[in-house]
Amino acid sequence: MDAVSVQAETTLRLDAQPVDYALVALYFIFVLGIGLLARQRVSSSIDFFLSGRSLPAWVTGLAFISANLGAVEIMGMSANGAEYGFPTFHYFWIGAIPAMLFLGVVMMPFYYGSKVRSVPEFMRRRFGTGAHLVNALSFAIAQVLIAGVNLYLLGSILNVLLGWPLWVSVLVAAAIVLSYVTLGGLSAAIYNEVLQFFVIVAALLPLTLVGLHKAGGWNGLRDKVTASPGGGAQLESWPGNALSGFSNNFLSVIGIVFGLGFVLSFGYWTTNFVEVQRALATHSISAARRTPIIGAYPKMFIPLIVVIPGMISAVLVPQMSEYKAAETSGSNYSGDVTYNQALLYLMKDVLPNGLLGVGLAGLLAAFMAGMAANISAFNTVFSYDLWQQYVRRDRPDGYYLNVGRLATVGATVAAIGTAFIAGNFSNMMDYLQTLFSFFNAPLFATFILGMFWKRMTPTAGWMGLVFGTGSAIAVFIMHKTGVFELSGQGLSFVAAGVAFVVDIVVSVAVTQVTRSKPDAELVGLVYSETPKQLRHDPDEANLPWYQRPVLLAGIALVLVIALNIIVG
């Protein structure tokens, strides 16, 4: 961790009072209580890993979006708001909603209908053990790294609240998450995520409203942002040059639409088992399809209470304003501020006691939801896709349940180690988007090609993944060694685009010289070979309109197009 981060951790303190501590303590009691209650429902590995496939769509839909409301959304997007302004909306309206709707309408029937227990298991059935092993290992590594991000930020909150050393704060935060996930498995994680969704909104909505009031309302904020470093471009979402790193407007739009809106977005939302796992916990194909579509509705409006507070912090908090001015001008800054602290500084400056406690509980809820989602997905993949498949086959169900609990402990310990890697990044989104370009972009290329092209071979599956991931890492290394320069988060857009194209090219080339699987083995895995009745609930036509996945998705798509046009 760099010296600036260390200094920040020792100087930023929140003026919390007993009422704030009491609200945080009450939240922790609820979290652990949900874990204990969920423990009573766990009698098999399916109960632990997939909640017995019994949860209603509204629960899994809220959990679907709450699982994503971790470091990526809260600290990362508020940091982006402070640094870039309105272009950050692209991560939601271009880089999330379309892919979530595609997952619900097109891909969930294959995941749920094939009765797989994880996304890597789907890869094994489609491509065999080569692609399966590459996917399972890369996914497991990614989850430990991303869990470390949430854990680092969770520990940072305890650090600035209580004054504990960061390493102590990280250990305490890890112990709390470990307790309820180990007790109740996915059910504990999901029900806590529903609670955490409401706690997060209850924390961030007042922060946004109070911050706007102190900034002089919307007109006051607009004037202050226009006069700040970065100027009026921060109030226009397109072409988003600062975010993409391209000075050319056309290239910037292409980078955002293709790199973020297609490759990174679809790669994350449609193949990330952290999210898909929530939909697999439902009771039917229709409910599984509705899960990401229901999640899309609150997702549209989350940026209003995440990005805007970051923008407010950058113009209202003196420390943030000075830091941004120094960063924008390229001069050396000797203070103790990073963009990741935008929300914390704003909370410190504008929230009265009581509301500060709610705000802190909201941040803790966000990071715990994110980490628990990563850990619960890791233990499923480790137990089913690695241990059961390659180490110990044909053991009793209880054996794999115990393996899952031990994997939860192991992942948490590993996340403690990776937490401190995250401390080296002033904007957490830089780190996270780099990880997504490595792991998610090539996986999406393999998935989408394999799902719609029956000729694609098992050998092409794993070779495409390996070369796609390798090309993204090569782009990252070339950037770090000065082969080319790109500011903002354009590096991850370029790396993701290269990984996607390389994966497709390699997969197509290898398919020409290797053997495909027989058509009979592709039923339920490839679109053209799967009968329509296997992709839909037989009773779906009798559902009321508000439970029909395609209609709900259509309404959501119209809304998000309208938001893009209005904000423009």
Image: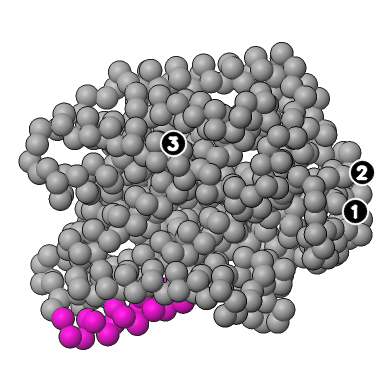
Majority secondary structure in the magenta region = helix
Give percent across and percent down for residue 238: 72, 70
Indicate left or right for 503 with 157 as reference: left
Rendered image: mark on residue 224: 1
Task: Give the secondary structure at mark 3.
Answer: helix
Give percent across and percent down for residue 165: 61, 29
- Check the image and name the residue furthest to the front: 3
Q: State whether residue 337 appears in this view.
A: yes
- Locate the C terminus by quadrant: bottom right
**Residue located 82% across and 33% down the image:** 350
Q: Nearer the viewer, residue 427 or 285?
A: 427
**Residue located 74% across and 22% down the image:** 16
Q: State whether residue 361 appears in this view.
A: no
In magenta stretch: residue 412: no
**What span is colored magenta in the figure?**
498-514
Indicate left or right for 392 with 567 as reference: left
- Check the image and name the residue furthest to the left: 394
Q: Which residue is mark 3?
A: 372
Give percent across and percent down for residue 126: 21, 64
Indicate left or right for 399 with 409 as reference: left
Q: Which residue is mark 2?
A: 216
- Do the residues bearing badges 2 and 1 touch, measured as CB atoms within 8 Å? yes
> Disc 1 or 3, which lies upstream in sequence?
1
Q: Nearer the viewer, mark 2 or mark 1?
A: 1
Q: CA distance from mark 2 to mark 1?
A: 9 Å
Task: Give the secondary structure at mark 1.
Answer: helix
| Figure quadrant of residue 74 | top right
> Disc 2 or 3, which lies upstream in sequence?
2
**Number of residues whose C-alpha sits closer than 10 Å to that of mark 3, classed few (under 14), some (14–19) or many (20 or more):** many
